[in-house]
Amino acid sequence: MNLVQILESFKTDPAISKNIAHWGKILPKEGDYDDFPEYIDRRLVELFKRRGINQLYSHQRAAVDNIHDGKDTVIVTPTASGKTLCYNLPVLDSIIKNKSTRALYLFPTKALSQDQLTELMGLINELNVDIKTYTYDGDTPQTARRLIRSAGHIVVTNPDMLHAGILPHHTKWIKLFENLKYIVIDEIHHYRGIFGSHLSNVIRRLKRICEFYGSDPIFITCSATIANPDELAEKITGKKVSLVDNNGAPVGEKHFIIYNPPVINPQLGIRKSALNESLMLAKRFIGERVQTIIFAHYRLQVEILLSYLREAFKEPFGKNIKVAGYRGGYLPNQRRQIERGLRRGDITGVVSTNALELGIDIGSLDVSIICGYPGSISSVWQQAGRAGRRSGISATIFVANSSAINQFLAKDPSYLLNKTPEMGIIDPDNLIISTNHLKCASFELPLHTGEQFRQDGTGEILDYLESQNVLRQAKNKYYWSSEIYPAQQVSLRSASPDNFVILNQSDNNRVIGEVDYYSAPIFLHPEAIYLHDANQYQVTELDWEGKKAYVKETAVDYYTDAETKTDLKVLGTSDEKHLGDCAMHWGEVTVTSVTVLFKKVKFHTHENVGSGKLLLPELEMHTNAFWYTFPGDIRFKLDLDGEKFGGALRGLSNILGKIAPLWVMCDPRDLRSISQIRAPFSELPTIYIYENIPDGVGYSQKIFTIAHDLFRACMEQVRGCPCVSGCPSCVGPEMEVGEHGKPGTLRMLEYMLRV
């Protein structure tokens, strides 16, 4: 069967059709074309014509004209609409005409850098012009670095390398900075929250160095669809940008299906597993050799789905169908191999985290299955865009899970389909972030008194750093005076730069993967079953000091799932509002988390077959939070004595934490919620929603502003849920909140909306 026949079979199969909450169709659209500009070198035009590109899309022409006119530009069009050509064409044209011209390309990941370099090198080789193009990242050999610094026309790198490897050594890069005409920042929607706030400060440092060497580069930025691309680009670059968003690329017919698994326990509101339903749908497509990508939220889900699919298509009856996994912990060579297999069509199915959301070239896929809400509307459309890169028919199936946020979207598809995607929120003037980058900037070039590195308060911060003997002031300038190399002390991402490497003891301690610092206690605790490329390894030792985990190959019929205990302390209140005898606040907090136990979960049935206690170090994070306090006698006012009150408070914390990301427009992983029956800070019953990002980026303040709307949305979700006592779709399962959890939570929400 082909794709159309499989989709038609869904309509007549009652086991599937009754679970389809929405079936929409995006109609095909013809492309809107324009001619190549006359000013572009004819060799370039002929090259693209040989490749079958006889005209530009209208948005490509608009972007190229903007850049030619010297305008800083942001290009916002869907996946596979040819954004890369928007910057490659003017950059190559400029270098052909003036050999001293230099360009700097920034991509958020090494994988994307390598992918874009391959495409760029293909153009240059075919063009037969001497344009030296190199990647400069942590994998670049020392022997090649001197050549890149002196001769590279186009340097392809990532923000981390620019921050720690290029800017502090700008005296070795004089040729680049004196002649830098273009700075390309791709995938700017990726730079939200803490990463974007850091990048904005890195760009401030970059602009200081360019000014010192006499260059004023044009910024070319590209983004997937977000609500405020021009605002985000302006915050990152510090320059006014021209927006190009008139997508002229043709669009094939696309089916968008929202699939809500059936309820298997009406009393508890438990639905069939989204993982198993995604597996069932994927097998239908992959079994008919329809090239399919399945997106899962977590690396563990990727490995479980991959194990099930490999089992389903193993020989001798697997029809020679190849299925691969793809996620961040895989080593670069393995990821490149998978990308090539997808492009060639050798791989029929791939299971991935959001690592394949970015614009890595994996060819033309037919179906995208999204297992659970990926965290943002923007991500849904990025993942959906992975299917249908040609003019034919494609399909995206969003499989909702039992969580409140997924059920909210399944009941109200218009939120997903019609609402403006999220805003990219960053805070470049976050005190801790900008102070760290002021240190880096002073190491690179002395800061003048009166120089405005951030919007306000630069002088006060410099004076403070001088008082701490980090800087010294002489002749109206601040000089770096510490022995520490500041850039190495600053990580641009929310996770620590210290990754744990995983060594396979069954194969002479060969490195098989890596895990970030904050995930290590969850995935690499002693006795954990670490899944990698559907193979099982048991962790024998976690060397915390050496940042290593030792594993051995094993074969068991279960995987492990760790539980973490979290404690929160308030450091200070930034704002508060009294509402009758209740109050809401936002401010600074510290969050301490420790992984305390793990469960053994059986494959396929997902039943608990054992557990174990863990003794691991505590991890502490300073961040911001929103919190809501109730009067001390609230349990008596609402007749919620003893266990009833604790369950109701937990239920309230659960539903607020689940729905808040939709109202704040952020990834659900960026927010966490907890409850305290008697909070140490106020000695009152309190619920907290804290930002799961070191130092925070402003989500808590936004919750404080829209709190009433959030409470009402939570009330509607809990009231509309068909369960009796509580379930994953509303306040949490009964075993967590108790049999009175749901009615108790409703009473508390009514009280909050009344005051």
Image (cartoon, helix red, strand yellow):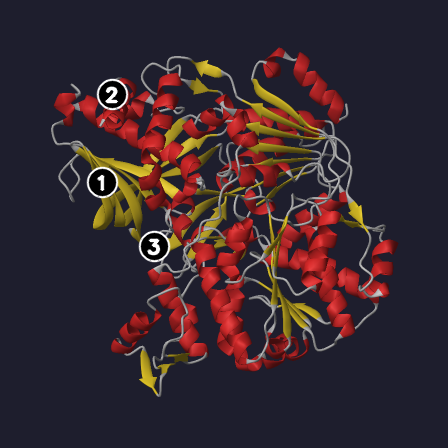
Q: How packed is label 2: few (under 14 Cα within 10 Å), some, or many (20 or more)? A: some
Residue underneath mark 1: 577
Residue 695 has which mark? 3
Is residue 565 depicted above or below 465 in this figure? above
- Tags 2 and 3 in contact by the CB under 8 Å rule? no
Q: Nearer the viewer, residue 198 or 64?
A: 64
Answer left or right for 258 relative to 403: right
Q: Amino acid at mark 1?
A: Lys
> Which residue is nearer to you in this view: 631 or 490?
631
Element type at mark 2:
helix
Identify the image quadrant of the C terminus. Answer: top left
Seen at 76% across and 45% down, the residue is 344
Mark in front: 1 vs 3: 1
Across and down, in percent, residue 652 comes to 29, 29
Earlier-in-chain disc, 2 versus 3: 3
* Secondary structure state at the residue bearing disc 1: strand
Image quarter of residue 500:
bottom left
Q: Which mark is residue 252?
A: none
Q: Upstream in the sequence, badge 1 or badge 2?
A: 1
At label 3, which amino acid type do we have? Asp
The mark closer to the camera, 1 or 2, is 1
Question: Looking at the image, can residue 564 be seen?
Answer: no
- Does residue 400 show up? yes
> Which residue appears at 81% of the width and 56% of the height?
36
Secondary structure at badge 3 equals loop
Type of amino acid at the residue the image marks with label 2: Arg
The location of residue 186, given as percent across then percent down, is 60, 56
Asked if 482 appears above or below 594 in the picture, the reply is below
Rendering quarter of residue 445: bottom left
Which residue bears the numbered disc 2?
A: 747
